[in-house]
Amino acid sequence: MPDHVSGPDDPRRFTAIEMARMRSFLSSPLQTALAALLSMGLAQSLHLPDPYWAPISAIVCSLDAFEGVVATARRRLFGTLLGVLLAGLQVSFTDYNLINYGIAIVLLGLLCTAAKLHPSSLRFGAIALTVVVSDPDHTDVWFTAGARFVDVALGIAVALFVARVWPTARHQ
């Protein structure tokens, strides 16, 4: 027989409420870490040139995910697509300078507004545009733009997958 039998007054005994709080406390960091780990592993296995963009996307979506993962993913994906396309066009057809860079971001904002996209789409698109136009090798701009889009799409897909399969209180 054990020396001590756990009873209702035992300080080592967790209540259901305490267990739920503990699950909630651990769930968000674990889900985010899993999405980051999986997306980094996939990006590295695909030999993407800058694999860190995939987990960055997964982290952004995961941190917003707990209520709105699909909305965040859609905004990030549309914004990124517009951003890399506009960046590719800018690098292909204009000289790089700060004026053209600023004009490209204004055009991106106008496109997002005209398409009635959420304002965060502009933020995500401007980040992607900045990454692409800042790449020192402009000879492969469309490869850079495509790689950025694939990185982001991969991170988003992993974040959506992890959010979908992650056990939540309503599934337990």
Image: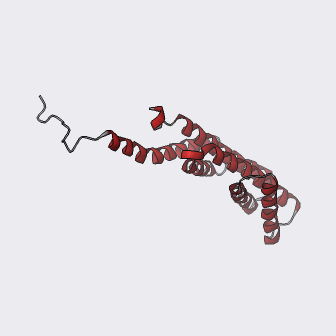
Q: Residue at x 75, y 48 (%)?
A: 146
* Camera-nearest residue between 80 and 98: 80
Q: Residue at x 78, y 63 (%)?
A: 105
Snapshot quadrant of residue 11: top left
Q: Quadrant of the C terminus?
A: top left
Q: Is residue 117 visible?
A: yes
Q: Is residue 87 above or below residue 72?
A: below
Q: Residue at x 51, y 47 (%)?
A: 32
Q: Residue at x 63, y 51 (%)?
A: 53
Q: Position of residue 4 (x, y in %)?
A: 13, 36
Viewed as shown, does residue 122 lie left or right of 26?
Answer: right
Snapshot quadrant of residue 21: top left
Snapshot quadrant of residue 47: top right
Q: Position of residue 22 (x, y in %)?
A: 37, 45
Q: Is residue 139 visible?
A: no
* Camera-nearest residue between 121 and 18: 18
Q: Looking at the image, how many numbered discs can be counted on the residues? A: 0
Furthest-right residue in this view:
93
